[in-house]
Amino acid sequence: MKILVLGDVMGASGRKALKKNLSKIIEEYEINFSVINGENAADDGKGITKKIAEDFFLDGIDVITSGNHIWDKEETTNYIEKENRLLRPANLAEGSPGKGFGIFFSKDKKYKIGVINLMGNVFMRKTEDVFKIAKDISKKIILKKNVDFSVVDFHGEITSEKMAIGHFFDGHSTCVVGTHTHVPTADTRILEKGTAYQTDIGMCGDYNSVIGMNKENSLKKFFKEKDAIKHFPSLGDGTLSGVIVEADVKTGLATKVSRFIKGGTLSK
């Protein structure tokens, strides 16, 4: 079993790189299931639209996760109620539209894969206690009981929360990956009980930027120059960044995890 998990798609640059490369990647690496974080996929880098989500599904993505920008496009609140493959963080306020986790099928329909979307509590929008919610969900998505494999996307700012969640799910999930900071970390590994882990898998977008935003304008904002304008995504050649996890069909746990970086300035 091979699972591809890609980081936050950042605006048009990330979407273009995905459309150009995803089908080839799925074929070349024999990917059985793919997840991408789409919360920055809109043209302004904030939110996702129905059209963008449906294009991702057509490109070969099986599930889209998200984070703190999930409600930045008004249409999403209605669309997410109808489209189970688009997830929002499970620890948003009770009663929020959509779902924070679900069970899906692999591309060949042979295996069930649980996908859990969580968001950190520190330096993020106000949410329910992520560790309490994670514990509750762990009793509903159970490896080798009601799912064959499972993926956790933890969308958070600080490394300690991400690492703690990784250890909490160790042995109970195929992989735990972090998103949100847009910079891939160098700690890709399999934890001691068999769960693949990386603190942040980076972004899909132009790395000749400031976390995906135009670098010239970002510098102006940091220097508080008067002609600085609202942040907007950089539109250069995009990099796809994430991980490929290979997992044992019998246990559902990882046997190998590799950082995946393709295209753009980051892979040169």
Image: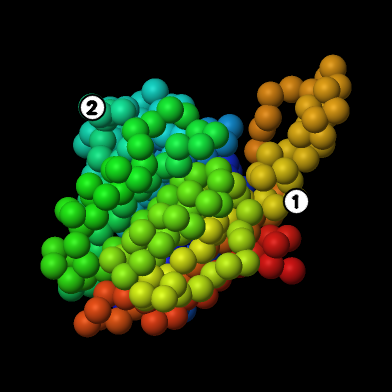
At x 78% / y 27%, what residue is drawn?
Answer: 221
Q: Position of residue 122 (x, y in %)?
A: 51, 37
At x 42% / y 42%, what residue is drawn?
Answer: 119
Of residues 232 and 182, the one drawn nearer to the viewer in this rendering: 182
Of residues 107 and 132, the one drawn nearer to the viewer in this rendering: 132
Q: Which numbered disc, 1 or 2, marks the residue that appears first in the sequence?
A: 2
Q: Position of residue 237 (x, y in %)?
A: 68, 54
Asked if one can make out residue 34 in the rendered structure from this viewpoint, the answer is no
CA neighbours of label 2 inside 10 A, class few (<14), some (14 to 19), many (20+): few
Asked which secondary structure carries label 1, the reply is loop
CA neighbours of label 1 inside 10 A, class few (<14), some (14 to 19), many (20+): some
Tell me: 38 left or right of 219: left
Of residues 119 and 63, the one drawn nearer to the viewer in this rendering: 119
Residue highlighted by disc 1: 208
Look at the picture and state if 112 lies above or below 73: below
Tell me: 212 left or right of 67: right
Q: Amino acid at mark 2?
A: Gly
Of circles 1 and 2, the one toward us is 2
- Whole-number angstrom distance, CA of label 1 to CA of label 2: 39 Å
Task: Tell me where residue 255 sits by quadrant.
Answer: bottom left
Look at the picture and state if 78 lies above or below 153: above
Q: Amino acid at mark 1?
A: Asn
Residue highlighted by disc 2: 95
Look at the picture and state if 237 lies above or below 47: below
Asked if one can make out residue 138 in the rendered structure from this viewpoint, the answer is yes
* Tag of residue 199: none
Task: Tell me where residue 12 sits by quadrant.
Answer: top right
Q: Are marks 1 and 2 in contact (CB under 8 Å)?
A: no
